[in-house]
Amino acid sequence: MEEAGVLIGAKLDFSNKIKKLVKKYGDKKIRSIRIGRRPINNLVERAFNIISLGAWEKLRKKYYYDVLMHLFLVLTLEDGTVLSLEKNSIVTMSENDPRCSLKDVECIEIEYPADSITVNELVEKPLTRIGKEKFFIYSPFEQNCQQFISDVLETFGLLTEKAKKFIYQDITEIVERLPFYVKYVAKAVTDVDATVSKITGAAAPPKKTKKISKNEKTNKKEESKDIQELTDFVMNNIFKEI
């Protein structure tokens, strides 16, 4: 089976949102670069554990992976604007990203000559170096969030040992040892997005509208990203060869 991104006809180009942000900030110099990481949402891990009939949790414990992380870059520009760049099911960029101030989110600043790279250069040079498919197509173990961050930093000689230790998590052993029956269970899942939404409660009917905080909104967005990552994970590693 083809990679999920190729299977669903992923566009090998930036989204309209990124294009607008790059047009707005592309010539701005980047004052500082941080790497951020946050735990994958517990509800999503629980959903995958259900799909794998408990195998995911057992293997995760066996190989001492207490917390699995999602990674992203946080860019502070010369005018004080804060942008984030990351790879979920697609490459995304956001304005005024608050995650480094949130609980359970770790961010480190990397060694970087201030104002030496523009936003245009940060997105264009890695794309030119690694090619469109590796840059845009998402694959949980070959072209995932940590590989994307590594590729971007390596392009500019910024992938230091400190950065590598912060970024790298190798979970390929877990996937290689998932029981054979997992793919048959997953084969019965005809709509992965809908199934995951039901398991996690994301498809529950809306309750009476109430005002939610900025942090709660951010957490909901992050949970949505996690659900998409889980969907892609299942498509690439359970439906594979079915």
Image (cartoon, rainbow, N blue to C red):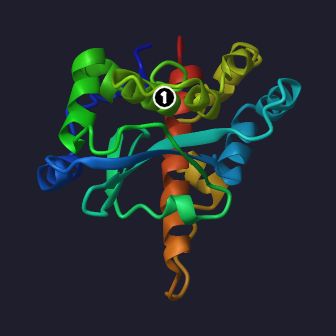
Q: Nearer the viewer, residue 230 or 242?
A: 230
Would residue 203 be seen by someone viewing this image from the given angle?
A: no
Quadrant in which the C terminus appears: top right
Q: Position of residue 125 (x, y in %)?
A: 23, 26
Q: Is residue 213 above or below residue 28?
A: below
> Which residue sits at x=49%, y=71%?
217
Asked which quadrant contains residue 94, the reply is bottom left
> Which residue sits at x=59%, y=64%?
102
Asked which quadrant contains residue 182, the reply is top right
> Which residue sits at x=39%, y=22%?
157
Q: Which amino acid type is marked by label 1?
A: Asn
Quadrant in which the N terminus appears: top left
The residue singled out by tag 1 in the image is 144
Would residue 64 be seen by someone viewing this image from the given angle?
A: yes
Q: Is residue 183 above or below residue 51?
A: above
> Which residue sits at x=41%, y=61%?
97
Q: Position of residue 135 (x, y in %)?
A: 32, 25
